[in-house]
Image: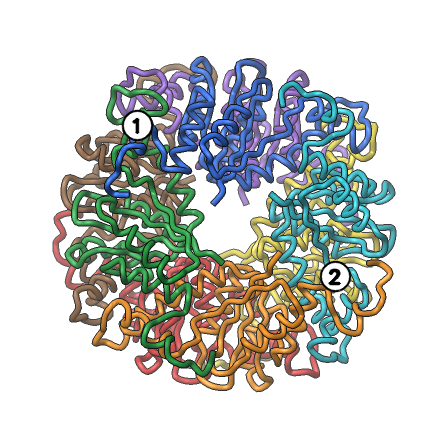
Chain colours: A green, B brown, C purple, D blue, E yellow, F cyan, G red, H orange
Amino acid sequence: MTWNIYLSGEIHSDWREQIMAGATEAGLPASFSAPVTHHEASDDVGVAILGEEPDKFWHDHKGAQINAIRTRTLIGKADIVVVRFGEKYKQWNAAFDAGYAAALGKPLIILHQDEHAHALKEVDAAALAVARTPDQVVSILRYVIDDALPGYTDTADPAQ
Amino acid sequence: MTWNIYLSGEIHSDWREQIMAGATEAGLPASFSAPVTHHEASDDVGVAILGEEPDKFWHDHKGAQINAIRTRTLIGKADIVVVRFGEKYKQWNAAFDAGYAAALGKPLIILHQDEHAHALKEVDAAALAVARTPDQVVSILRYVIDDALPGYTDTADPAQ
Amino acid sequence: MTWNIYLSGEIHSDWREQIMAGATEAGLPASFSAPVTHHEASDDVGVAILGEEPDKFWHDHKGAQINAIRTRTLIGKADIVVVRFGEKYKQWNAAFDAGYAAALGKPLIILHQDEHAHALKEVDAAALAVARTPDQVVSILRYVIDDALPGYTDTADPAQ
Amino acid sequence: MTWNIYLSGEIHSDWREQIMAGATEAGLPASFSAPVTHHEASDDVGVAILGEEPDKFWHDHKGAQINAIRTRTLIGKADIVVVRFGEKYKQWNAAFDAGYAAALGKPLIILHQDEHAHALKEVDAAALAVARTPDQVVSILRYVIDDALPGYTDTADPAQ
Amino acid sequence: MTWNIYLSGEIHSDWREQIMAGATEAGLPASFSAPVTHHEASDDVGVAILGEEPDKFWHDHKGAQINAIRTRTLIGKADIVVVRFGEKYKQWNAAFDAGYAAALGKPLIILHQDEHAHALKEVDAAALAVARTPDQVVSILRYVIDDALPGYTDTADPAQ
Amino acid sequence: MTWNIYLSGEIHSDWREQIMAGATEAGLPASFSAPVTHHEASDDVGVAILGEEPDKFWHDHKGAQINAIRTRTLIGKADIVVVRFGEKYKQWNAAFDAGYAAALGKPLIILHQDEHAHALKEVDAAALAVARTPDQVVSILRYVIDDALPGYTDTADPAQ
Amino acid sequence: MTWNIYLSGEIHSDWREQIMAGATEAGLPASFSAPVTHHEASDDVGVAILGEEPDKFWHDHKGAQINAIRTRTLIGKADIVVVRFGEKYKQWNAAFDAGYAAALGKPLIILHQDEHAHALKEVDAAALAVARTPDQVVSILRYVIDDALPGYTDTADPAQ
Amino acid sequence: MTWNIYLSGEIHSDWREQIMAGATEAGLPASFSAPVTHHEASDDVGVAILGEEPDKFWHDHKGAQINAIRTRTLIGKADIVVVRFGEKYKQWNAAFDAGYAAALGKPLIILHQDEHAHALKEVDAAALAVARTPDQVVSILRYVIDDALPGYTDTADPAQ
């Protein structure tokens, strides 16, 4: 079985690449997906394809709906959804994705720094893990997918 | 049929009271519910009932999970979910609720000021109405529940 | 048990009133709902409540989405969905409602004249009854809800 | 992941072929399906296989039900449903498919000319994109499936 | 809570009346429903309401589909489905109802004589109780709904 | 896409083999499954594996439950369910499977001789096709899966 | 709205009565249900109603299946499921109920003493609250259903 | 089709290995999964990856939630769930998994010794087979997946 992991949220650092590199290095049978992370493309896709809108609200609306074709489909197919909250911006789409995934019963891993813990308590309360670093997410994936926990499973296990 | 309306989001103004008063005045068969809107109660409920936690993370966690008993149940029973985003704070729980409701297929009405439109575009894209004022929400409810649109349905309608 | 009957489709004749009158006369425990049947209100509701749109597409879009709050909720709560196709117009919303109800597993009764039979064959194929007159729909409701079939159940039935 | 795209609606022009050719040219991992587009076969399949019917209604019914085995199964397996409305005919089956797909939560792309916009407003209101040309649909698929938006993603993106 | 009990199957004896009388006598908060049990009405309802069919297959088909509006709706609303198999006839509709209810996860009680046990083994294997008499069904309902088991709960129970 | 076809019902003739041979000959991308068709194995499997039962009811019960592991799983994975009713026996398991598949929304093809039409009317009313011969089922599969209808699609089709 | 609370688990102390008394005293709109808590009745119900079984396994099986009619129905209708683990016995049915409720997405409150915490960690991990006393459960219900948290909501709240 | 079999429960003997070896020997197209069976890893995974917790309850909680990412996902993907109860310990997680799988409609095979039969009666009542040995489970899998029942299907079967 290949595990489908959806990586939602912050698009201004390379956390997705770190997780994917770690998973590759560990040889995990995992397939990763994400929203379109090109900020301008994601903002403008509606009008770029379907025609200009003089009103910014509809400019945004057309783009956001096309993005939803991708994001809702991939969340729906995911076995695990990881949502990262960064230091800046409102990131309401990240919290929306977390709620969306929670209602579908998807296991959630939330990734954020300590200073956001109080503001994210309702989101964290719906998660099965709250991590601080991409490395921790990789460790969780290694354990969950591959039974591997350094210091434990790399020593002899008589029951296996 | 009584319509169940869940009012999620900002808890620092009286928008819920305005909507409920408007619905009452209009005589709508609607029943409203909401999260616990007492900020401190909502923060402390976990430790107040189940015992102190020295670690703030678990303090928050215990409270947020008890709040989830209420919020997820009421969203699950709602016919319409209204989510208001205010001027301040991260309000990730509001966006989480919107995503949660969207995944359950609940009709969403989002209520916010223009300056948040771009940051909320993914949330708005999942909504069936984006309003600026509680009065507009009341008007939508009057129309949706009661067929009433001032200037239209209060004049003669030969087909009815 | 009260049966919820949703009456979708054509809004230019009094077929809904005929069915409701027939059901009342028969004393059926049935509750009827419908889309907003005031044509102009239904067209303009979006801009009337949420503000003007210079572009007719968005004028229509805002209204149609508010109408969807009503129609999808009521179809979702219906026990039986009746969809009438009239003589004029495209009536794509009627066919959309039929498809929507079919996917939810709602029993469908389609009401139309013979000349539309070929064009409606896919819609009829999803229905449990295809009727020509409101009276026939009333007769079906009487039978389904109340066991009553004139000429049969009004004579003695030894097994009951 | 291969994306399953169902192409519903009008069968008298080559719009399906245009979309499939565009997707192939773009190298998209997409698999396309559609109703049987041979008009006469689709009309007669019931009686051709299961025996003649003197009554045209049952002739149509037997065929439409066999077509439904195909269409409902493929819509149920689709990740995206595209529905095209042409210039002619009632096309109620297209609107039925749109409603059916909407109730299943499938992302909808509607394809039609401007003159049908008002009549299709309820259908468009359920869609995540409303396009005018097959090329636009291909562009949406390229973006949604492959992150590709000409003029944006073909320039350097430091976050990827 | 009122329990909804659907009584499917054999229509040639008064087993439904016996169960309902027993439930009434026990004062159970139960509401009973059933298919139309007037055999001729049930056979002819399609043509009686919607017009004659020269072909017996379509005569039957129109009636069976109208009956399905009733039976599938009531099974869908039932908390418990009781299916009785009598001594005569194929009774395929009874077995169909049992399968239909099983797939919906409804608790099934099957009622039949010993001589049918082998032929009904797959049906019985999906049931939570297999009874021989209407009295046994009443006893099960009394226990399940009302905690009452003669010889046990009518004696003192220190834990209650 | 490979279509999964479940072949339920009568086990005393070679109708399954005929359908599978026809599908193979037509080169259809179809995968067939069925209950265990070895009558004695199917009767005795429970006691053969899990130990003897003096009471025939439990002998049957243990076997029927193990058979259900197979049949319910395969019906749940099927795209199309074909149910054949033969000339003999009660065949309640066949009707049960039909009801089970219907409640899951599986497209049903029922296969039986004319003399059973009246007794099977409720089952047929839930089907999308009622066939008399295995050849007709093959023809339906060829059309549904492969667009092929002899006399139609083997002649030129300008729209394809 | 009346909240349905299902009280599963240990039957040898009066914890249910304590919770119900507390809820009544607080005037909560709550309705409570539970398994049959008469131990002997619950063990013997199958044979008492449906006839003796010489084999204890089937004696137990018949009873446990009848109990399941009650417990699965009531858990399915519950808004909140409380599961108490006592000091003695295996109590596998309690853990089974917890898993059953969790898979249905029901909010879970687990009630147990500290010494069982490690053995119950997987069960607790699926819960939204882990309480030690019936009083704590009452406090949670008062907060969740009625917004009431002593020391907080009984002081002035300007936002309400 | 490859069958996915989830092996839940007791981790102190080699029953999983016996079942997998038997399935391999029989050449069954089956894929097996299980919880992490390294006891210490399973206990400590939360703190090992996400940081120490001074309170044992949260130590357990963090680990149990990470384990849930694995177990709930794999149970959700399983075609058959086997749950073994051993001689020792409370094994509430095994019973929880059984309840979880039952609510998802997964076919359950329970594996335990006779002395636990009474305590497990509610769990057994939800199962489609109750086995005593891993060999019996292999025999069930061979029959269910491969039609093979020694002494029956290895002799000539005229209907196949």
How crowded pointer 1 is (Cα within 10 Å; few <14, some 14-19, many 20+) is rated as: few
**Amino acid at the residue labelled 1:** Gly
User: What chain does badge 1 belong to?
Assistant: D
Q: Which of A133 and B122 is in front in this view?
A: A133
**Amino acid at the residue labelled 2:** Val
Q: Which residue is drawn at 70% across and 24% down?
A: D43
Q: In which quarter of the image is the N terminus of chain H?
A: bottom right
- As drawn, the label of residue G112 is none
The residue labelled by disc 2 is F36
Q: Quadrant of residue G94?
A: bottom left
Q: Quadrant of residue H128?
A: bottom right
Left or right, G72 with respect to G112, comes to: right
- Note whether residue E16 is visible: yes
The residue labelled by disc 1 is D151
Left or right, H107 with respect to C147, comes to: left
Q: Label 1: state its secondary structure.
A: loop
Horizontal and vertical percent position of residue E155: 54, 80
Q: Nearer the viewer, residue G115 or H20?
A: H20
